[in-house]
Image: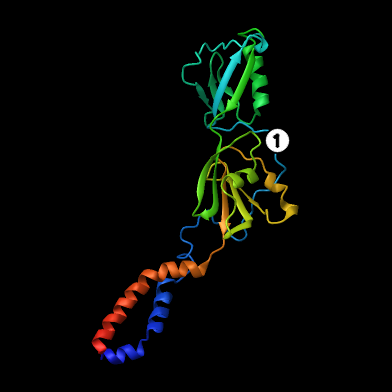
Amino acid sequence: MCRTFYKVISPVSLLLLMVIVLLPSCKMLTSSDFFKTEKDFSYAEFKPSEKEYRIQPFDKMDLKIYTNDGYKLVDVSNTPMTQNQILYNVEFDGQVKLPSLGRVALAGMTLREAESMLETKYAEFFIEPFVMLSVVNKRVIVFSGGSSSGQVLEMKNDNYTLIEALADAGGISQLSKSYKIKLLRGELTAPQIFVFNIRSIKDMQKANFVLQANDIIYVETRPAYGTRIVTEISPYLSILSSVLLVYGLFLR
């Protein structure tokens, strides 16, 4: 009985049967991938980037106010330099609660525009106020090798671009698609999704795209089905080898 079964079901046949049963679709091979879009998905339209960062909800602001147009550099917040830095949160509606002014809408402004507006408002309280404003928590998330390689990067400057972020993340791997780089911006429930192609020089101007805080960059990767199939079936091949070994002992 065992001898007949062994002749009918060869090791190769068993292996093929296992592949058919265990790998019914490509989803098993790409189960770790994310940010998938449909083939006919309408990506956000690319527009040349502004050269200045615009304040966003959930930014953390460092605010310093000096009097006499900054001549004496006297910090009117009366915060000793030895104390912890005081940060101001940009709330979900784009407003920031500031000393003496209460809540002020800053989201959507560049830092220069916000400083100018605040200097005008603080002129009611101080002589020739001088305002210095900065965002201290600007960061982006980069998946440079699909879902297998991710980093959180601090934005080094106000003009931090897509190319700079990819370089800081270590570049693009050999399995990555340089012609399909997705950028997600805004709330994840309904984000804007841009797609970039940096494979050709003519498309490189888009890669100079200025990033905003909390942008997510995802570089798609080639499937590498062969490697993934081997990885998936390796445990089962080990089981198959053990089974065949047992069969061999019975056939002796």
Q: Residue at x 40, y 79 (%)?
A: 15
Mark 1 Cα-neighbour bin, 10 Å: few <14, some 14–19, many ≥20: few
Q: Is residue 88 above or below residue 144?
A: above
Residue nearest the observer in this picture, 90 or 79: 79
Residue placed under numbered mark 1 in the picture = 51
Residue 189 drawn at (x, y percent): 52, 45
Comparing 166 with 223, the one in front is 166
Q: Position of residue 172 (x, y in %)?
A: 59, 53
Looking at the rendering, which quadrant does residue 101 occupy? top right
Image height check: is 168 above or below 66? below
User: Residue 129's quadrant in the figure?
Assistant: top right
Q: Is residue 209 left or right of residue 6?
A: right
Left/right placement of residue 198 relative to residue 248 reads right
Q: Quadrant of the N terminus?
A: bottom left
The residue drawn where x is 70% and y is 37% is 50
Q: How many marks?
A: 1
In this picture, is 114 found above or below 154? above
Left or right of 249: which side holds 27?
A: right
Query: Which element carries disc 1, helix, strand or loop?
Result: loop
The colour scheme applied to this rendered structure is rainbow
Judging depth in this view, the residue of 252 and 194 nearest the camera is 252
**Where the C terminus falls, by quadrant?**
bottom left
Q: Amino acid at mark 1?
A: Lys
| Identity of the residue drawn at 56% across and 11% down | 76
Left or right side of 6 for 146 = right
Q: Residue furthest right?
A: 202
Q: Position of residue 180 (x, y in %)?
A: 62, 56
Q: Position of residue 22 (x, y in %)?
A: 40, 72
